[in-house]
Amino acid sequence: MALPPLVEPGPDLSPERTARYARTTQLPGYGPVAQRRLRTARVLVVGAGGLGSAVLPLLASAGFGTIGIVDDDQVEASNLPRQSIHTPSDIGRSKVESAADAVRALDDEIDLRLFAERLTAQNAERILSEFDLVLDGSDNFPTRYLVDDAATLAGIPVVWGAVHQTGGQVGLSWAAKGPTYRDLFPVPPAPGSVANCAEAGALPSVCGVIGSLMVGEALKLVTGTGEPLLGRVVVHDALRGSFRELGYERDPQATPVTGLIDYDLFCGVSDTMSPAELHARLIAGEPHTLLDVREPWEADIVELPGSLLVPLGVVQSDPAGVAARLPRDPLVIVCHYGIRAETARQLLAEAGLPGVVLAGGLDAWARDVDPQIARY
């Protein structure tokens, strides 16, 4: 069913703005008032990667007056096929700054609010307090649950999107009006069971499709037109060229969200060592074994010196055998973001070899210790 408009309309548009949006305001049930609501609306985009690249130009072109962007990453060459808001000349730049330039090129009157930082339980409530709704284009489960909980506490809706290889999903989470992301996914998947885009890849066109659907939901919410995806998820399969819809309801027995938690721990990422701690150990020459559980092609791009490369699939096929062959020095397990490393840690611990995970993986190492190494 339709919901009331999310925001009140702003002042009348200038003649230039009126002419600019003439083809939109003539839509049935839309009109100039809807366009004035968009100019008033404040939307936060989490992630300036694949989905953010699709979402941000559409938000700017549609007439949203305030756009926030939060992302702590830098542009890499491997991002360019699916993260179309960035160009080769942006490689090495902050994704937030690169994306902001693209938004300004479309509309230099937009109030841009930039957060070149990782969204955490410590800063989420502060950041979300500036906005009316969130579009979540993050690519990991800890961030998705964090955004959902923070938005629940703030009383604002979240339009979330997810892409994986050749398919994707989009839905709406809004505790004040209906079910949330937690009602659909009360328990996160086991660590390592679902790879993110950087690990599994994503068809560039899927990012465009899912991002467009996300912006469509934002338009409906702000203007009060159409039927938002509350209690529904749209699933897209690009290889079949198909869409299907799944319905779900609020879980009456779900634990209420009363505060933010440790989302890495909630999603099964535990027993970690920070990049700074590992760096200190390496400088001190303390004994250790660095186990890299990524794929060989990833190690060809970047690896920590002295690492032993044993892909996660090998560990999963014979954890006892791998444990028996590894040195008995303190074990630090490494992957791209830390998710696959946590799966390996659990398997090796069950086989009698305890270890810790490099928190945030090589991506965090590049961010916190050695920004000169390649990020992919």
Image: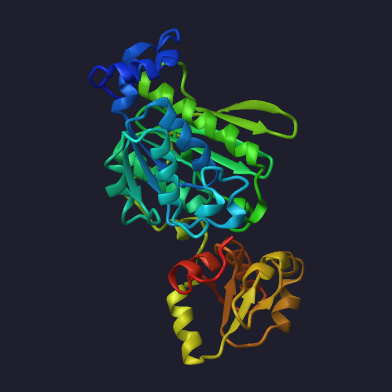
What's the coloring here?
rainbow
| Extreme-left residue of the structure | 11
The quadrant in which residue 300 appears is: bottom right
Q: Quadrant of the N terminus?
A: top left
- Residue 111 location, x and y as percent? 30, 37
Q: Residue at x 47, y 38 (%)?
A: 181
On screen, residue 27 above or below 250: above
Q: Residue at x 48, y 86 (%)?
A: 281
- Residue 159 location, x and y as percent? 45, 34
Q: Is residue 245 left or right of residue 300?
A: left
Q: Residue at x 60, y 42 (%)?
A: 163
Q: Residue at x 66, y 87 (%)?
A: 327
Query: Is residue 230 at least partly visible in the picture?
Result: no
Q: Quadrant of the C terminus?
A: bottom right
- Residue 69 location, x and y as percent? 39, 45
Query: Is residue 91 at least partly visible in the picture?
Result: yes
On screen, residue 307 above or below 112: below
The quadrant in which residue 343 appears is: bottom right
- Give the mark count: 0
Q: Nearer the viewer, residue 39 or 156?
A: 39
Q: Nearer the viewer, residue 307 or 121?
A: 307
- Residue 191 location, x and y as percent? 58, 58
